[in-house]
Image (cartoon, helix red, strand yellow):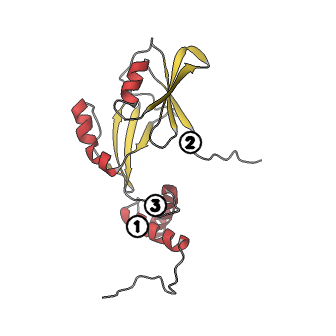
């Protein structure tokens, strides 16, 4: 038996309401360019809108002019989507509370996740949206996932409850030492003072 190896998220498709409310939220609130539009090829009564969330991948929305936004929370039963998280820069994250408040959009306020900061709010259909901002940049040649697994291992080695910035900093140092050669024989911390 062999795996079906994935190589990244291709797209997420959500069921939306009408066309304009979908465009107004995904592009008008979250700033995702509306890049492609065609009928839903499996249901001629629906449209299929495509948005770029910022990394060239896709968020797509099935729309139907007969559907109207419902503002209750989407189901969180097993098998349902709990929330969708989007990466934002630190500069944007520092403005999220103010910009959501300007629009009267209720939100969680900033949440400390140890390795990132998050804020949660609902889209017009009740889907929980998270805006997340990493607290670190991975070293050259590494991904955020590389830093996360290294930080996890350090956290577990030390018996710490949850990930903290010290685990991230130590993980980055470890990854640089493993991935970047040096002419030095001794790469341990030194005191030149």
Residue 169, which numbered label? 1
Q: How far apart are marks 1 and 2 (CA)?
A: 27 Å
Q: Marks 1 and 3, Cα distance to the nearest angstrom? A: 10 Å
- Pair 1/3: label in front: 3
Q: Badge 2: how crowded within 10 Å, few (<14), some, or many (20+)?
A: few
In the figure, 27 relative to 38: above or below?
Answer: below
Q: Is residue 88 left or right of residue 138?
A: left
Residue at point 35%, 29% (across, down): 28
Which of the two discs, 1 and 2, labels the residue nearer the N terminus? 2
Residue 66 in the image: state x and y as whole percent.
Answer: 45, 11
Residue 70 appears in view: yes
Question: From what the image shows, is residue 40 above or below residue 5?
Answer: above
Helix, strand or loop under label 2 = loop
In the picture, measured across the screen, residue 119 lies left or right of residue 184, that is left
Q: Which residue is drawn at 45% across and 65% down?
A: 155
Q: How crowded is mark 1: few (under 14 residues within 10 Å), some or many (20 or more)?
A: some
Going 57% across and 20% down the picture, which residue do you hit? 40
Q: Which of 183 and 169 is in front in this view?
A: 183
Q: Name the residue under label 2.
A: 9
């Amino acid at each position: 038996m062999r795996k079906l190896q994935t190589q990244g998220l291709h797209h997420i498709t959500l069921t939306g309401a009408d066309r304009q409310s979908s465009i107004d939220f995904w592009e008008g609130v979250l700033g995702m360019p509306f890049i492609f539009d065609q009928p839903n090829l499996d249901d001629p009564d629906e449209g299929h809108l495509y948005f770029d969330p910022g990394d060239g991948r896709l968020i797509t929305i099935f729309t139907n002019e007969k559907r109207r936004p419902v503002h209750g929370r989407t189901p969180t039963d097993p098998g349902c989507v709990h929330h969708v998280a989007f990466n934002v820069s630190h500069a944007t994250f520092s403005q999220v509370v103010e910009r959501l408040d300007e629009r009267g959009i209720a939100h969680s306020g900033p949440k400390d996740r140890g390795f990132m900061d998050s804020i949660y709010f609902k889209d017009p259909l009740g889907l929980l949206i998270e805006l997340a901002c990493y607290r670190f940049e991975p070293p050259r040649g590494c991904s955020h996932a590389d830093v996360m697994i290294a930080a996890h291992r350090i956290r577990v080695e030390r018996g710490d409850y949850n990930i903290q910035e010290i685990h991230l900093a130590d993980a980055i140092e470890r990854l640089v030492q493993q991935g970047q050669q040096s002419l030095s024989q001794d790469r341990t911390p030194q005191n030149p003072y």
